[in-house]
Amino acid sequence: MAKQIGAPRKQKGKIPAVKWLIFITSLALYCHLSILARFVAYLPLEPLGLGATTETIFTEPKQPKSKPHSHATIGRDVIVYLAQFGQHSSYGNQTDGRNSITGATKLNRSLNTLYSNYLNRFPCDVIVFYGEDDSPSHDMLRILQQGRPRLRFHQLNDTWWSLPHGLRAEDRKNWKQPAYSIGYRHMIQWYAVRIWPFLTKRGYTHVMRMDDDSYIYSVIQYNMFEYMRQNDKRYAFRQPCIENNVGVGFFEIIDEFLSNLTSGVVDPTNLDTYHSSPKLGFYNNFFIADISFFMAPPVSTLLNVIDESKQIYEQRTNDLIIQSLLVRLFLSPEQVLWIRDFTYEHTTLVGGVWREKGCLQNGGISRGIGSHSDAEWKQIQDAYERRFSHNPLCVTKKAVRKAWHVGAGDIAQCEDPNGECAKGLQYFSTKPPQFDEQNDVIPWHSSVAGVHAGSAFHRR
């Protein structure tokens, strides 16, 4: 048969050009995807995308999109709680006046006031932590989360919630104030030492603390995190106090550390105010902090010294005095802010087997400057005292009335202009800077309705 003119010739052992093109394209695509996968694997985690952990985090209910009222970057700021959902590990079953209360009840109240008076205007992440010894039901967590955007729950595992090396739980009977539980001392260590690296690893730069019995009773009309950043404030508090429960040997540890620092690391004025009022503290059930301050030397170095001393566990030296001392020593007074423009309550009640159960022990309500009239403030004070009128023994722990506070004497004494507390506070900036800068009275906000039903807190 004659060969057809122009017919292609068969080439044995060679791959057609089209197949070569397909092969090269596939190889290039594979390499591209492989490199992309490796890149994605090293991307930083989102603040709430905590990866493979043992935490309990539920998908939040879908919320309508709303434009934030500030320029804050999502994920930089976080509000934290450390909650106990049942009875308190140290105080046992608690009562507030005549009413029995649980940790979950208090937390729900606190979240109501937080969202109503702040977060609905200036949203940010909220994480409720809890220890391994207090696991709430999934139903309880879902109820608490309902209608509260960006609220998460995280159980602290043994990495963050454990005794330091060399300490045993059975030795607690030999520690100072053994009635305070191991969990209570874990709480101190968490807020004094461990929270800073935990939040840093998750991309946060600023943190605000609330307790499950912290209540914000008036509207906050600005983003507090943004205010801190814009005004070069690195730490803020709401209530000052004098802390007398300091472990034996604690100040000696601090003095030895300071003596070994290079001259000039601590401002001489800060040293003078520390030595003149060493027990001045910031009631840190509410604070706002620049996390990087606690993560850098010499602050982080001193924190490590305190942690290794085991003062937190053996002497029950608390996070209040530790945190306050670090701020007072290593920040200039201009970087510390006393926020006074919203009304705030944190009341610690007597619990356990004490006869004064349900009576006032520490804290109280601090009046927000411009938040309500004098007549209304008197109503609030009256109502606060009535909460403890059920028990005649509460007379021995009667609330102290002041112009800007009603509650226990640990905070009330700070209004004495000649006292140790006031002398130390004079160096810090306040918001508002001057009391006469807020002449407009802000009505007592309706969000407190139901928190203390039947009292001046309940407005119709």
Image: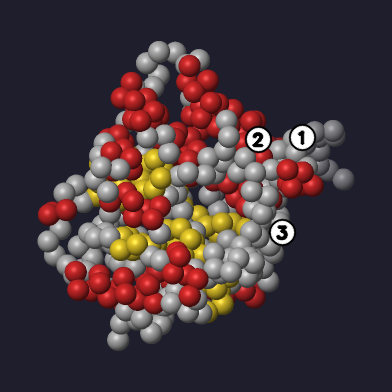
Splitting the image into 4 quarters, where does residue 234 fall? top left
Badge 3, how many Cα within 10 Å: few under 14, some, many 20+?
few
Q: Amino acid at mark 1?
A: Gly
Quadrant of the image for the C terminus? bottom left
Report how far apart the C-alphas of labels 2 and 1 lie in the structure: 9 Å
- At a point 32% along the width and 75% down the height, the residue shown is 382
Q: Alpha-carbon neighbours of circle 1 within 10 Å: few (<14), some, or many (≥20)? A: few
What residue sits right under mark 3 in the picture? 133
Where residue 301 sits in the image (x, y, percent)? 54, 26
Q: Identity of the amino acid at label 2? A: Lys
The residues tagged by marks 3 and 1 sit, at their Cα atoms, a distance apart of 21 Å
Look at the numbered discs 2 and 1 and tell me whether their residues touch, using CB distance below 8 Å: yes
Residue 321, percent from left and from top: 48, 40
Identify the residue shown where x is 44% and y is 74%.
Answer: 388
Q: Distance of mark 3 from mark 2, alpha carbons? A: 21 Å
Badge 2 crowding class, 10 Å Cα cut-off, few under 14, some 14 to 19, many 20 or more, is some
